[in-house]
Image (spheres, grey):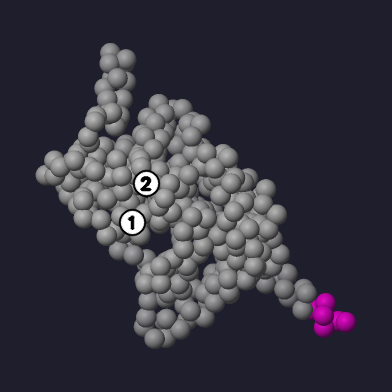
């Protein structure tokens, strides 16, 4: 009976090798993959996610111009500051998956993207440029729409000022060497790989393959500027009754930002998920200073409300999950605890200076 169940599960997940997949079949398969991965909140999945993060951390450490790295988004907002605890079930993801299935359910036309991508993916460093204007498939079934429903990891490399191109070149080579891809390098292969990953994690196996990675590069001085500006931006937004917003448009190892794109809201990521690793120079001290200021000036409730102000609607819905609220609380309490040490240390330095 167990073998039959396993075979049934594989059949449910597997993207069948049909000659011409339809928009409907692709929407259904991607939705199912994403939902099954989200429902699996086992220790195996937690360990696997952290394996992906540490792999990127290791690759960055091999690049001479690196000054550390950090992660944002999932799983960082869901695991708290020490990457520990049970993974919460993000029900918002189910809503997106259901929407995808509904939007593609009545479309039995051929998903022509597969043939196009197999021929042209290597020529398309940014799918948005080539796929957005295309009229051959509906908006719901375009490659970026489909792969956006699949799990990935957002990681950022910090590089020395003036070394972006060097960082892009070296990071690209290392990611290729270790077979770590962004989801838009080869979307068809990405969906096949994630299908295999989902099945293995569901069976309690740590996959050898890595999840797609959204890899960004940011210069030291730019990250420093963003971090240092946070207290003032929050204060001014409160005074002017505005949404706190700091635009961040990082470099990627594959693409650049279009001029009309707004960029990420750094405030949102900083308050909810910013998780640093191996920072070099004064960035670690900048983080301590800013976090100490925020935890001293604002209560937990006040800072949480500022986070919600800066969050998109999807994040606001997601944050109704009690375990995610608890992760935010733990992050704040850690900042609060370290703020005491920070101010005690600074007072001693100030007293020493006065004695001299």
Q: Quadrant of the N terminus?
A: top left
Label number found at residue 162: none
Image point 62% across, 51% down: which residue?
A: 170
Q: In this view of the protein, can residue 339 be seen by the observer?
A: no
Q: Are marks 1 and 2 in contact (CB under 8 Å)?
A: yes
In the depicted view, which residue is nearer to us: 141 or 345? 141
Residue 354 covered by magenta stretch? yes
Q: Secondary structure at mark 2?
A: helix
Residue 278 % position (x, y):
66, 54
Give residue 40's quadrant in the image.
top left
Q: Secondary structure at mark 1?
A: helix
Residue 287 % position (x, y):
61, 66
Q: Which residue is mark 2?
A: 120
Q: Residue furthest bottom?
A: 240
Image point 32% across, 20% down: which residue?
A: 6
Give residue 165's quadrant in the image.
bottom right
């Amino acid at each position: 009976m167990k073998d039959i169940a396993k075979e049934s599960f594989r059949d449910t997940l597997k993207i069948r090798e049909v000659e011409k997949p339809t928009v409907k079949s692709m929407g259904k398969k991607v939705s199912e993959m994403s939902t099954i991965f989200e429902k699996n909140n086992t220790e195996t999945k937690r360990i696997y996610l952290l394996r992906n993060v540490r792999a990127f951390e290791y690759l960055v450490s091999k690049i001479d111009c690196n000054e550390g790295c950090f992660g944002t988004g999932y799983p960082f907002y869901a695991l708290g500051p020490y990457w520990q605890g049970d993974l919460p079930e993000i029900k918002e993801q189910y809503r997106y998956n259901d929407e995808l299935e509904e939007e593609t359910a009545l479309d039995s036309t051929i998903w022509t993207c597969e043939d196009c991508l197999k021929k042209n993916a290597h020529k398309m460093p940014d799918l948005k440029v080539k796929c957005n204007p295309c009229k051959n498939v509906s908006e719901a079934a375009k490659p970026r729409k489909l792969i956006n429903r699949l799990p990935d990891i957002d990681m950022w490399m910090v590089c020395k000022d003036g070394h972006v191109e060097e960082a892009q070149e070296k990071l690209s080579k290392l990611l290729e060497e270790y077979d770590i891809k962004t989801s838009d390098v080869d979307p068809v292969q990405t969906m096949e790989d994630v299908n295999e990953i989902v099945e293995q994690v569901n069976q309690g196996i740590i996959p050898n393959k890595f999840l797609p990675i959204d890899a960004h590069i940011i210069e030291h001085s730019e990250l420093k500027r963003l971090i240092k500006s946070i207290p003032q931006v929050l204060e001014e937004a409160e005074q002017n009754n505005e949404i706190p917003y700091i635009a961040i448009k990082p470099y990627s190892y594959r693409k650049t930002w279009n001029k009309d794109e707004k960029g990420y809201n750094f405030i949102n990521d900083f308050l909810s998920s910013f998780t640093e690793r191996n920072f070099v120079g004064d960035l670690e001290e900048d983080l301590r200073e800013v976090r100490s200021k925020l935890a001293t000036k604002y209560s937990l409730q006040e800072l949480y409300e500022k986070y919600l102000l800066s969050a998109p609607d999807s994040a606001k819905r997601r944050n109704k999950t009690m375990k995610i609220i608890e992760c935010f609380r733990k992050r704040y309490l850690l900042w609060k605890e370290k703020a005491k040490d920070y101010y005690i240390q600074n007072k001693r330095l100030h007293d020493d200076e006065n004695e001299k």
